[in-house]
Image: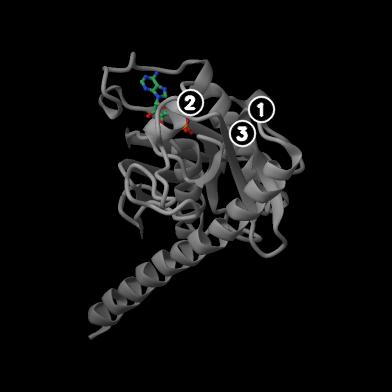
Amino acid sequence: MDSDIVMVDDKGKRLDGRKADELRPMKIEAGVLPNADGSAYLEIGKNKVLAAVYGPRECHPRHLQNPTRAIVQCKYNMQSYSVGDRKRPGPDRRSQEISKIISEALEAVIQVELFPRASIDVYIEILQANAGTRCAGLTAASVALADAGIPMRDLIPSVAVGKANGHLLLDLNKEEDNYGEADLPLAIIPKTNEVVLLQMDGHMTREEFDTAMKMGVTACHEIYEMQKDALRRRYSVAAEEEQEVEE
Ligand code: ADP
């Protein structure tokens, strides 16, 4: 953390030209991997993320089976080439933590009670990382689950709010994340605004926290619209293809 670096100019503009409460440009596409049961590709700023879903299917290893409901097994993985310096491949503490919190968030919306003893497997691949990848991964994963036709109460949009130079900033990029004072990733169930993921690095006052939560929840609703739009586009294409086959 280095508060000498100016990350917000006197007009309130950030290093990449955004306003404090502005998301990076975002793009979501559902159904990009035909061999998976469901999938999604997401870009937000320089982040590039793929999510693929299998299941519900028989849970392996068997000792993890739950006789009353399905379990969600998420594997978040950052590719070696996703960051500037080659990342050592394979699981590490950070990816295990992120996999766990994403699984827990998804279990809050998937109707797991419909599939006893089953596993729903979610693979998140970070192809390019520029801060906010856990949020991007979760946002993409919930679209991939919907694409797989898995019954869910809602989608989960997710974004981080942070603090740099004393300013609250939505959706931190890598520079803001590195040199900022705080980072607060969150995810909600939009229908109820229930929080299903919340973490915090660094420090915020109680007032800053309340404002950051409001900024994050508002942005999650924006992301929710993009998620629904991706699914609408996916299903209108699928319906067109079906019609062509019939003809
Ligand atoms: P998130 O990506 O959810 O913001 P972190 O705050 O842990 O998660 O990481 C912030 C950013 O730091 C990542 O998006 C990535 O650009 C970079 N980063 C994380 N881990 C590594 C690593 N092992 N090597 C290089 N860069 C990394």
Q: Position of residue 119 (x, y in %)?
A: 59, 39
Amino acid tagged 3: Ile
* Cα gap from disc 2 to disc 3, whole angstroms: 30 Å
Specify the quarter for ligand 1: top left
Q: Is residue 120 left or right of residue 112?
A: left
Task: Locate the C terminus and report the quarter of the image it occupies.
Answer: bottom left
The quadrant holding residue 84 is top left
* Cα gap from disc 3 to disc 1, whole angstroms: 17 Å
Residue bearing mark 3: 101
What is the crowding at mark 3: few (fewer than 14 residues within 10 Å), some, or many (at least 20)? some
**In this view of the protein, which residue sits in the foreground, 158 or 71?**
158
Residue sitting at x 43%, y 26% = 178
**In this view of the protein, which residue sits in the foreground, 47 or 98?**
47
Residue bearing mark 1: 64
Mark 1: which secondary structure?
helix
Residue reaching furthest to the front: 10
Amino acid tagged 2: Ser
**Residue 146 visible in the shown view:** yes
The quadrant holding residue 101 is top right
* Cα gap from disc 1 to disc 2, whole angstroms: 46 Å
Q: Is residue 179 left or right of residue 102?
A: left
What is the crowding at mark 1: few (fewer than 14 residues within 10 Å), some, or many (at least 20)? few
**In this view of the protein, which residue sits in the foreground, 104 or 247?**
104
**Label placed on residue 3:** 2
Q: Position of residue 75 (x, y in %)?
A: 48, 31
**In this view of the protein, which residue sits in the foreground, 126 or 213?**
213
Which is more foreground, mark 2 or mark 3?
Answer: 2
